Image (cartoon, helix red, strand yellow):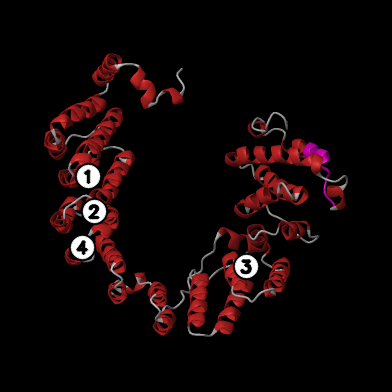
Amino acid sequence: MASKSELSAGKLKELGLDKLAALVIEEAQANAAFRKRVSAALAGMKGPEAVAKLVERRLAALEKARSVIDWHKIKDFEKDISATLATILGEVGAASPSIAMDLLLRFIATQDAVVGRLVSSNRIETLYAEAAAALGPLAGGLAPADIDALPGKLMTATGRNPWTLTLATEGLLPHLSSAALENLDSLLAQKVRDAGHDYRAGGYRKLRQIVADHGGDVDKWIALETEKPEHTRDGLAIAEILLAAGRAKEALAWMERDKPTHVGYAYAIDMADGVIQRDHKFSRRAGLKAAILEALGEKDAAQALRWAVFEQTLNVEVLRVYIGKLDDFEEFEALDKALAHALASKARYRALAFLCEWPHLGHAAQLVLSSNAHWDGQHYEVIAPAADKLREEQPLAASILYRAMVENILAKSRSLAYGHAARYLGILDELAPRLATGAMAGMGRLPPADWRAALYKSHGRKTSFWAGVPKSAS
């Protein structure tokens, strides 16, 4: 087999024109999508208008077709759509951006009809997303008059699909004139009115906010946010944009209007510690308030708030900001205080995650190996990443965590997780020679070989598990 390095332009030229032409003809006869690419390239020798005619015929066929595309035809159809898009962007786009823009918009307009004919559309939808994203780069070659006409054409092409419209608009914004931006916003406002209570109204309104943000119009962005139904309105987002604009007092007022919810929720790490949260925006809210206080000249109050939040959440980013605001040399004392607080925390799983993420693996190992610590393997979302981080520097602590997960999976016969348990067992066998003699026994636990034997005695009949254990470990 030829290596990839041999498939270069230079190497192919060495084959000679006749050989290359024969290969192209052979592939074109077997591959319809490639044949269309070759035909487009040949038409391109006559100019972009000739290629455009080929593309227009294909687009007309897509616009008229209604038959369902079965599974066995999807791959060929995807190749055909991909070839059409490549021709628009390549053959036509390189020669005439204005013609390519009209073809690309017409191509995008076929999305709903095409997707509706497919039994599976993931790849096709990706191609249409690529087409929408390509509008921006293509717009860079347009004349001012063509740019000003884009908003109306874009609305027609995207129809009732705010997602595609958003992808297209985000790429086009840097190229639009002030007049085009105003026209776009006006058309989007009409879309919002036409949508009424339909979910699409939210997408169009969000897009108007993107346009307002691009133009630096803070008040318009806020006005659009307040148009949303109250339960979807984000007062903290308003406060954030006001703070960024240097309007800290207004930001504080808006932040205080955004009241916390009392609905209970819990992340996996909260469930491990038996904690129920009551405000899913707590960290964001507190961090924002601290930033506002600092902007208002109340640095001490801001720092006190950050520390209080860290004590409650053990949030790494909150601590980083807090320490970053300290004077020189104060950070060492603050970090020592933070690490001591984590070690003493009743939220042991959150403390473990914090110490591994900071990272301070020595303290993490100390927490794992503390005499009163019991680690429940069912909380693998916390334990597995911690064990992986401790594995190199702290093999004893890592072994405790890996054992907990293996024991939990096998004790509860979680067959879907046997693959993970087998991998953990392999890691434990690799770590065993690195443990100090008597280290496990000193903690009141079985030494590696004895633990392994006990594991087999209790779960030896779980053949699907043992079959997955690495050969070197089994």
Residue 189 figure quarter: bottom left
Residue at the disc numbered 2: 161
Query: Residue flagged by tag 2: what amino acid is it?
Result: Asn
- As drawn, 272 above or below 127: below
Q: Residue at (27%, 14%) from the top-left corner?
A: 18
Point out the frontmost of discs 4 and 3: 4
Residue kind at label 3, given as amino acid type: Leu
Query: Residue 111's mark?
Result: 1
| Three-letter code, disc 1 | Gln
**Disc 4 and disc 3: Cα gap in Å?**
47 Å
Q: Position of residue 348 (x, y in %)?
A: 68, 63
Q: Which residues are magenta?
A: 444-454
Q: CA distance from mark 4 to mark 2?
A: 24 Å
Image coords of residue 266 (percent x, y): 54, 63
Which picture quadrant has residue 314? bottom right
Label annotation for residue 62? none
Mark closer to the chain start, 1 or 3: 1
- What kind of secondary structure does the magenta stretch mostly adopt? helix
Q: Residue under circle 3?
A: 314
Local SS, label 3: loop
Query: Disc 1 and disc 4: Cα gap in Å?
Result: 27 Å
Q: Which residue is mark 4?
A: 177
Mark 1: few/some/many CA within 10 Å (<14, 14-19, 20+): many
Residue 250 seen in the figure: yes
